[in-house]
């Protein structure tokens, strides 16, 4: 398998197109997930969600112990051979067997630790899912190597659709946590089948090329282990100190609050990794790409995160119902915190692409050493709200660490980065102040009934979006219409209008 020559001139367009497909995939899967969640929260007990959240947290942590990151290592090779692909598949298969065995061995001790007998059978089912995933076709890595994320979209969405259908059907029939487990397993089986349908590559078992993959993979493994320890700590701390219901409330609140990250920045991270790899292989400087991405990402994620935080009360009532009101402060805190995640994720994509995972490991170790003690202390003092505060403080430290390490390496001054971001920050401040003045920010809804609460949510959201757009436009004009993210969005709007045959396309 050979790669096409990287086209540096069109790289920004390829990133935008790739990110668009990943965002579309996230949008489709999240809407499917949202639909199933809106149904499931009315069919299942919160404790069912908490039980599965504990199981998936335990499984992900064990999975990280054997995660060598061979696919990322394969992507970084300029011209990977057939042996490289087959070795990557074989290492992944061996890893899956080892992980499934470790989860199985830990199932009953984990159930005893959390005083939850049902957890053992949940973990056995998740171990089977891990084993299924290990047989996926390694040939699908070429979708990312060539930034062909349209195929990634189809690979991800169809299996997700099948899994959601099964989850809802089982929930209607059984009304218990096996609906969630069944959906996970069916999704993995469907994805396995798709990987061999969509890629003609047929892997063989060999370890001949392990030396070319293992160096990068060992650092990737260390980073992955630390990431799982850090990112899953809240589930273990809450599950041990509080109840499975509290685990569910925090997990769902964190998921809603983190929507700007999961729907925008993580897809961007996936595309950026491929783009930074192309630049690195072509010996191109990533400085401009880094700054452009930071500006565009901040322009989108800041109002999204702050906006979700502002309307958390009606949002939780409409999406989840009255049984989940304890998640409101979690959503408010986590959504506000999510706005700064762009700094870490864009920098992480750069370090991963250039193979400097030692820096990532050091920063993640510091982050874990801050996060876990904070969780232990603040959960014991303030419960679920304390957990959200702990994650917020730890996240702020993360961003500062990454910025402090990345900006000097790329020759970017802090003032230069700030000059790219201040307009979005100012517009967002205007939005928050205006909504607060009108009594629509961080305020409980006074509407009664799902339809009136939905109308309240939509009106607050529309008002916030309008205020942000107006303030951003005015600040951009006052700054002299710089050729930044706003101008890029206008050019996209102009192209769309011309394609639709609408006159008066904006001229930039």
Image (cartoon, helix red, strand yellow):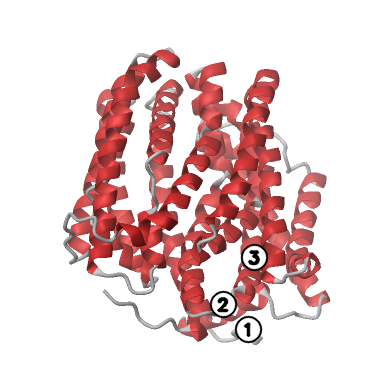
| Marks 1 & 2, CB-CB < 8 Å contact | yes
Q: Nearer the viewer, mark 3 or mark 2?
A: 3
> Along the polypeptide, which appears first: circle 3 or circle 2?
3
Query: In which quadrant of the rendered view does residue 230 lie?
Result: top right
Q: CA distance from mark 1 to mark 3?
A: 24 Å
Residue in the picture at 79% in, 76% down: 477
- Location of residue 154 in the rendering, given as x and y in whole percent from the top left corner: 30, 61
> Along the polypeptide, which appears first: circle 1 or circle 3?
3
> Along the polypeptide, which appears first: circle 1 or circle 2?
2
Q: Residues within 10 Å of mark 2 (few under 14, many from 20)?
A: some
Could you tell me how many numbered marks the image carries? 3
Q: Determine whether, in the image, residue 79 is placed left or right of residue 393.
A: left
Residue carrying label 3 = 294
Q: Is residue 242 visible?
A: no
Q: Residues within 10 Å of mark 3 (few under 14, many from 20)?
A: many
- Location of residue 268 in the rendering, given as x and y in whole percent from the top left corner: 52, 62
- Location of residue 293 in the rendering, given as x and y in whole percent from the top left corner: 61, 68
Q: CA distance from mark 1 to mark 2?
A: 8 Å
Q: Which quadrant is the C terminus positioned in?
A: bottom right
Residue carrying label 1 = 506
Residue 493 is labelled as 2
């Amino acid at each position: 398998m050979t790669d096409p020559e990287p086209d540096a001139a069109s790289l920004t367009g390829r990133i935008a197109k790739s990110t668009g497909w990943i965002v579309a995939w996230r949008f489709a899967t999240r809407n499917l997930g949202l639909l199933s969640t809106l149904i499931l929260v009315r069919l299942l007990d919160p404790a069912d969600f908490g039980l599965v959240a504990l199981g998936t947290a335990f499984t992900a942590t064990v999975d990280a112990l054997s995660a060598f990151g061979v696919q990322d290592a394969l992507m970084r090779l300029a011209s990977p051979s057939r042996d490289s692909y087959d070795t990557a598949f074989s290492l992944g298969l061996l890893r899956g067997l080892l992980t499934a065995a470790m989860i199985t061995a830990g199932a009953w001790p984990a159930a005893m630790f959390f005083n939850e007998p049902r957890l053992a059978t949940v973990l056995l089912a998740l171990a089977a899912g891990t084993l299924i995933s290990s047989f996926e076709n390694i040939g699908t890595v070429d979708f990312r190597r060539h930034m062909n994320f349209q195929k990634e979209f189809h690979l991800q969405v169809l299996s997700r659709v099948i899994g959601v259908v099964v989850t809802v059907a089982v929930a209607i029939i059984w009304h218990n946590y096996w609906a969630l487990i069944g959906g996970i397993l069916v999704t993995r089986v469907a994805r396995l089948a798709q990987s061999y349908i969509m890629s003609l590559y047929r892997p063989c078992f060999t370890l001949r090329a392990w030396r070319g993959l293992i160096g990068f993979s060992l650092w990737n493994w260390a980073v992955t282990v630390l990431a799982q320890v850090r990112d899953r700590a809240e589930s273990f701390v809450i599950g041990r100190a509080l109840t499975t219901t509290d685990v569910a409330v925090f997990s769902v609140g964190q998921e809603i609050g983190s929507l700007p990250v999961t729907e925008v920045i993580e897809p961007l991270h996936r595309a950026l990794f491929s783009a930074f790899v192309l630049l690195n292989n072509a010996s191109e400087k990533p400085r401009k790409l880094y700054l452009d991405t930071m500006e565009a990402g901040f322009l989108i994620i800041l109002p999204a995160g702050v906006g979700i935080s502002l309307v958390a009360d009606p949002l939780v009532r409409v999406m989840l119902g009255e049984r989940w009101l304890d998640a409101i402060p979690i959503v408010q805190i986590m959504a506000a915190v999510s706005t700064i995640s762009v700094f870490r994720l864009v920098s992480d994509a750069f370090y991963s692409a250039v193979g400097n995972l030692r820096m990532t490991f050091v920063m993640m170790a510091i982050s874990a050493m801050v996060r876990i003690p904070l969780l232990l202390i603040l959960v014991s003092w303030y419960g679920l709200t304390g957990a959200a505060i702990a994650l917020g403080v730890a996240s702020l430290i993360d961003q500062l660490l990454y910025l402090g390490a990345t900006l000097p390496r790329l020759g970017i001054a802090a003032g230069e980065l700030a000059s790219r971001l201040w307009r979005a920050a100012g517009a967002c401040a205007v939005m928050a102040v205006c909504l607060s003045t009108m009594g629509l920010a961080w305020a409980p809804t006074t509407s009664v009934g799902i339809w009136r609460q939905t109308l309240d949510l939509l009106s607050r959201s529309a008002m916030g979006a309008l205020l942000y757009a107006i303030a951003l436009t005015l600040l951009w004009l006052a700054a002299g219409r710089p050729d930044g993210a706003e101008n890029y969005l206008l050019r996209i709007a102009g192209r769309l209008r011309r394609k639709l045959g609408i006159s008066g396309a904006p001229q930039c």
